[in-house]
Amino acid sequence: MLKRLPWTSILILSAFVLAAVFAPFLAPHNPMQGDLMISQTPPAWVQGGDWAYPLGTDEQGRDVLSIILYGLRVSLAVGFGAVLVSLLLGTPLGLLAGYSSGRLGEAIMRLADIQLAIPTFLVALVVLALTGGGNIIKLILVIGVVGWAGYARLVRGAVLSEKETEYVHAAEALGMSRARIMFRHILPNILSILLVQMSVDVPRIILLEATLSFLGVGVSIETPAIGLMIKRGLDYIYSGVWWTTTLPGIVLATLVLATNLIGDWMRDAFDPRRKAN
């Protein structure tokens, strides 16, 4: 299994995470302070560039590299934070719906069906637009709360299979409480399924955050974010200022691709049906 690890993707994702964590030390300039006298300076390797601004500057004279480094913090924080919120909300409800029969389980699943019928992007867009956009915490909460239904349905399906196994019947025969059986015995045996789903959801939410910021309803304009930078750069791309859109777009695409490849590997590694083949 180790030989099949996507080492390139792991190294790329690790580099992005480290860059985001140590952005205050790696960024050569303050990402939100610019100088109009050096606005739209091209990257250092292009004629007219300056190595003091390796990736150039934007229309307000802000350093592109510094904005990207801080923007990675926003993308990764929202991606992993929203997934964690969805996991914490959906997993207990899925355990309860799968292990408990009757009206309670049905009610939880009907709520999940209603939630899944409405696209996450649409709900987040409406909520953020009505509340006047938001900060990182608001984005994490809105996207995370909307995503609970997928985890609840996934966990319920796994629990329906696990609760018919011998170890669950033995625990029930010993008189263990439902809560102990669900959280101490069933949950550890379905963690691999949850890890795979999380690895698939993280890149999707990173793109969702960038899209919402691009549309102007994500993080505030005072926050250095990749989606916002791409949006601002589009106004000048036809004037030959390509780096303020292209370079952050490449970083975002690379981040999402690396995370997707790791998710694909985890799905292949932990899915028993794929192992059998």
Image (spheres, rainbow, N blue to C red):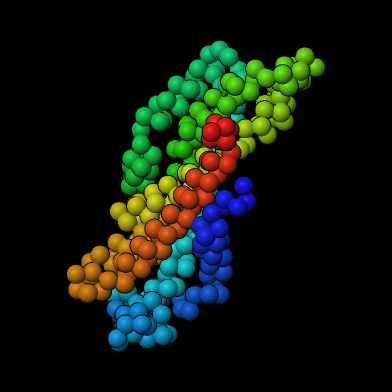
Q: Residue at x 42, y 25 (%)?
A: 113
Nearer-the-camera pick, 230 or 273: 273
Front residue of this view, candidates 134 and 70: 70
Q: Residue at x 53, y 67 (%)?
A: 19
Q: At x 67% / y 19%, what residue is drawn?
A: 165
Residue at the limit of the structure toward the front, as seen here: 277
Residue 184 visible within the image? yes
Q: Quadrant of residue 102?
A: top right
Percent from the top left, x then y, of residue 182? 67, 26
How far across and how far down the image is residue 212, in percent?
A: 35, 51
Residue 55 appears in which quarter of the rendering? Answer: bottom left
Can residue 17 be seen in this snapshot? no
The foreground one among 155 and 164 is 164
Residue, x 30% and y 53% (percent of image)?
215
- The vertical placement of 202 against 26, above or below, is above
Q: Position of residue 31 (x, y in %)?
A: 43, 73
Q: Is residue 88 left or right of residue 122?
A: right
Q: Is residue 229 left or right of residue 269?
A: left
Q: Is residue 210 depicted above or below 21 in this figure?
A: above
